[in-house]
Image (cartoon, rainbow, N blue to C red):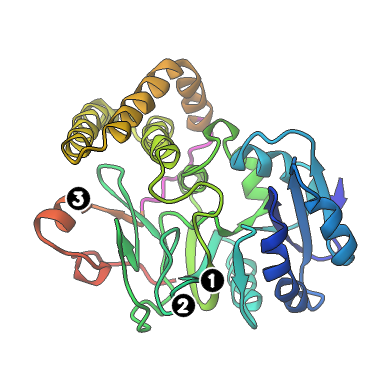
Amino acid sequence: MIQCNYDTAVVILSYNGKKWHDLFLPKIIEQAKDQYQVIVVDNASTDDTLQHVQTHYPSVTTLHLPINKGFANGYYEALLQIKATYYILLSADFEVTDHWFPPIHKTISSHPQIAVCQPKIRYWKERSFFEYAGAAGGFMDYLGYLFCRGRIFETLEEDHHQYDDAVELFWASGGCFVVNAEVYHRVGGLDRDLYAHMEEVDLCWRIKNAGYSIAYVPESTVYHVGGSVISYGSTQKLFYNFRNSLILLLKNERSAKLCWLLPVRLVLDGVAGLQLLLQGKWKHTLTIIKAHFSFYGQLGLWLKKRAQNKALITNRNTVGIYNKSIIWQYFAKKKRTFKALDFKTKSI
């Protein structure tokens, strides 16, 4: 068990991530300033990443996992071995900025009702734009589709300070994810069976169902390279996105709503698959079919998890759910930015 010297542990899960550590660890270490402990978790790397970190960054605590079982399971196993008041799950391909830590720490430590928060996330390669996986905070429409302030589907907005207000979210990005450790463990932590993608949304949904809030902290900014583990647009990413979105609904949504929502999602996924087929992307269509077979093939497992989650529900916090279809707003009404939506956010 690693007992942190400070109340916050910045935990970086790494798989063959030496190049990212050389780029980004120096700034993370510099900004620590006796405020947080940096822990690099080596997820069974096949190169000398672990030895490299131990040699060149002696102030960093290291933890080795002998078997790589994916992103969600890697963090699940690591956080069982780390004792702190707050965890910051920080992907290896993130660049932090000056004074990135104090605003998010102040937010989560001074508001007991806030169990999770995230900073503003910009794109490392085009630094004035928001980044795909998180942007200015995550939301969900009533059909279970996810989107962000600053990114709806493939549309990334440039940051003109239009989202510099602190608001309550439905989910925070797992790339830079600040969570109250006691709440994290009480709701069961990350679901290791999701492997990768949307595991943070699932965790946030369980935390929201337990009555807590999730916040966006615009005073803190980080930059994300993105697509460094599973590339954007790949069939692997497509598989986990379609499969895990169904798992999220089954595990966390109300029973009455599930009766009509799952059949609707089956139809909508079929439409998406047909569109990809018409574009000549037959491999992507087969991937969607494969995702559905995987979901239904393990239905017993997901139903068991649903029963476990139900026992944790106290006072569902539904702030951050959009009561319209983001698909209809984006594709039919051509509303490509969050500001264009008729969506009133709740200030923190």
Question: Which of the two discs, 3 and 1, labels the residue nearer the N terminus?
Answer: 1
Mark 2 burial class by Cα count in 10 Å: few <14, some 14-19, many 20+: some
| 81 over 250 or under it: above or below | below
Residue numbers of the magenta segment: 311-318
Residue 327: mark in rendering: 3
Q: Seen from this angle, which residue lies furthest left?
A: 332
Discs 2, 1 touching: Cβ within 8 Å: yes
Q: Residue 33 sits in which quadrant? A: bottom right
Q: Position of residue 265 (x, y in %)?
A: 24, 33
What secondary structure is found at the residue carrying circle 2?
loop
Q: In the rendering, which numbered label is found on residue 223? A: 1
Question: Which of the image's four quarters has the C terminus?
Answer: bottom left
Left or right: where does residue 239 sit relative to residue 199? Answer: left
- In 3D space, how far apart are the residues under numbered discs 3 and 1 (Cα atoms)? 27 Å
Q: Residue at x 42, y 22 (%)?
A: 294
Type of amino acid at the residue the image marks with label 2:
Arg
What residue is shown at x 24% (from left), y 64% (from top)?
343
Q: Can you tell which mark lies on residue 127?
A: 2
Measured as percent of width and height from the top left, residue 131 is found at 43, 66
Q: Is residue 325 visible?
A: no
